Amino acid sequence: MPTDNRLPRVLHVLLHLDEIKDPVTSDMLGQMLGMNPSLVRRTMAGLREAGMVSSTKGHGGGWHLTKSLDEISLADVYAALGTPNLFALGPAGDTPDCLLERAANEAVAGALDAARTEFESRIANVTVAQLFQGPRKEVAKHQAKRDRSSHAV
Amino acid sequence: MPTDNRLPRVLHVLLHLDEIKDPVTSDMLGQMLGMNPSLVRRTMAGLREAGMVSSTKGHGGGWHLTKSLDEISLADVYAALGTPNLFALGPAGDTPDCLLERAANEAVAGALDAARTEFESRIANVTVAQLFQGPRKEVAKHQAKRDRSSHAV
DNA sequence: TTATACGTGACTTATAAAGTCACAAGAATC
DNA sequence: GATTCTTGTGACTTTATAAGTCACGTATAA
């Protein structure tokens, strides 16, 4: 199966929607993302249901933000996509009779759970707005320098 | 694609190989795991190359351990399988021109990296031998009690 | 010599996301 | 009201990859 790219893609979309204040059509988003406009609509449907974006039909219609990006965490976006399966790996069969098989499954499941927890805590503590800090690294650096002179990090 | 079950499966195999001291044929393992003997051989090939097990042909042949299970970490097994892809999720396109897309990718990649690190540290610190502690929970509990009375956890 | 048993190339199958197409329905503009 | 734009969605096809299957060569033990 092709790797699930929806999370980075919709994040990308949100960042663009924040820059372009007018509604953006699925067609334009499709060109930005290199994907079919129909697929854009389908992928964005979850974000609309989650109240992050809104779509309007007809002339001058398209997608626009209905929330500030600093009020949306990456975890919110992940959840809006339906919390897609995170791992390509998994236990074999559910609740097998063999105790050894169960032990093997549980060990793997345990490690995966720990990884999932780490992933979720990471994305829960980053807002989409903060992603701008990548492109604006220099600004952030200077900001951090100023911060350090006034209070500890 | 069906989920990658190789890690729990080969762990299961190793636990059985430790119980049954005689060589076990791929056919028998296939029945235990509910999979084709040919697939068993293919899946076990990595463990053989890693020196964890050995296979012998002909009458009375089959698979047997060449290492103690307490010398094999889950991470060793994972590596022996070729470090299969851990995530069903991933960044879209590599090094895109759009800065916003790159920021989105990096954010996702960062969270995934953190999750992978957590996963790897988990499996690095568990030996296959320790998986027996699941089925032998009661024993482990008493052991832990004794441990606590002598030194801090 | 024969019955096992592994090793492996060359397939087919299964699964889920990606991608495509068509068209109904709503909204703005003339 | 007719036209044009745009979303929403059903019904597909395509793609990627692990799982699974089959066949057969090779090696080993009895």
Image: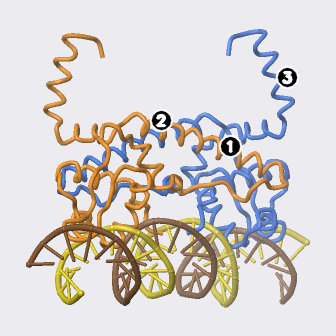
Chain colours: A orange, B blue, C brown, D yellow
* Other residues around mark 1 within 10 Å, as few (<14) / some (14–19) / many (≥20): many
Secondary-structure class at tag 1: helix
Residue A99 rendering spot, x and y as whole percentages: 83, 48
Rendered image: mark on residue A121: 2
Q: Give coordinates of residue B97: x percent, y percent.
A: 17, 57
Residue A127: image location, x then y, percent: 34, 38
Mark 2 residue element? helix
Residues tagged 1 and 3 counted as in contact (Cβ below 8 A): no
**Identity of the residue drawn at 48% across and 49% down:** A79
User: Between C8 and A140, which is closer to the camera in this rendering?
Assistant: A140
For discs 2 and 1, the disc positioned in front in the rendered view: 2
Q: Quadrant of the N terminus of chain B?
A: bottom right
As drawn, is B31 to the left or to the right of B53?
Answer: right
- Rounded to the nearest whole Å, what is the CA distance between mark 2 and mark 1? 21 Å
Whether callout 2 and callout 1 share a subunit is answered: yes
Residue occupying the point 18% across, 55% down: B98
Question: Which residue does the numbered mark 3 point to in the structure image?
Answer: B142
Q: Chain of mark 2?
A: A
